[in-house]
Amino acid sequence: MTVKAGLTQIIVPENCKTFLDIAKNTGYDCVELLLKQKEGYIHPGSTDEEIREVRAYAESLGLDIVSTCIGRGSYNLLDSGEIQEKGIQEAIEGLKVTAKLGAKVMLHTLGSFSPDLYYEDAYSNAVKSLKEIAKGAEEAGCALAVEMVWNGFLFSPLEMRNLIDEVGSEYIGFYFDPGNMAVFQYPQHWVRALGKRTKMVHMKDYKGGPLNGKWTALLDGGVNFQAVMKELKAAGVPPVFISEVDKSLDSFENTAKKIKEIALFYA
């Protein structure tokens, strides 16, 4: 199976065409676009012509658009009422755009807490939101993947697995980022627990603990990438690895080379 090293627009604050040029010129095979309401970006309000233009430009460079990330907006899938409904609709519209771009996965971080939004209520709201979104995801033919981020929610791989299984749709899955859980746990444990539910993989590394740690270049932190790759292969997760390593930590070129070096453990 061919390894693909990708770059996410999350860490490249440039318009789509400039971002695609950067990805091509620094050694990447594929990209993840950030859906953002800003000129030069693709977002749920983009016209079909704008979407076709970006997709065609990526194809002209030999880059696959494999995923998107819907940026944090006014939505909150952990809450209830109007803000939840708006988030559901934004997510469904984002999935439609993702499909038109030719991608199969859209990253989502669900939302955030407030003093009056209790954990168990947030969990129930998330299940409800994702069940609604799953219908739109199936219609669009691409999946929404939930990433574990530092929002105080889903800090256990078993909890993430239970959430996804409770939603009960192959179109709702897990977006794995080893750097995010290396702060607290062992990333390879998450891969084994989530298994085939894993839809896409970010590449980051982290050194230290929650109060004294820092992001690092790949292979300079605490992630055991050999163990991670072994578990990803055992789970049947395709070897498509999207860099989220900021250029302040390492050059995009070096990161692309390191991803392909790490991927040798997958073979």
Image (cartoon, helix red, strand yellow):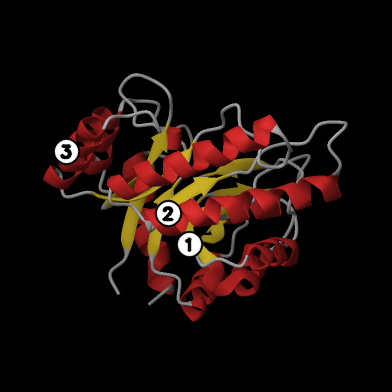
- Report whether residue 45 is seen: yes
Which image quadrant: the N terminus?
bottom left
Q: Which mark is residue 199?
A: 1
Label 3: state its secondary structure: helix
**34 and 253: which one is in front?**
34
Does residue 176 appear to the left or right of 7 in the view shown?
Answer: right
Q: Which residue is mark 3?
A: 57
Cα separation, mark 3 vs mark 1, equals: 25 Å
Amino acid on which disc 1 is placed = Lys
Q: Amino acid at mark 2?
A: Val
Residue at the extreme left of the image, as rendered: 60
Q: Secondary structure at mark 1?
A: strand
The residue beneath circle 2 is: 105
Dot 3 or dot 1, earlier in sequence: 3
Q: On screen, 224 above or below 86?
A: below
Residue at the image point whose x is 23% and y is 30% from the top: 50
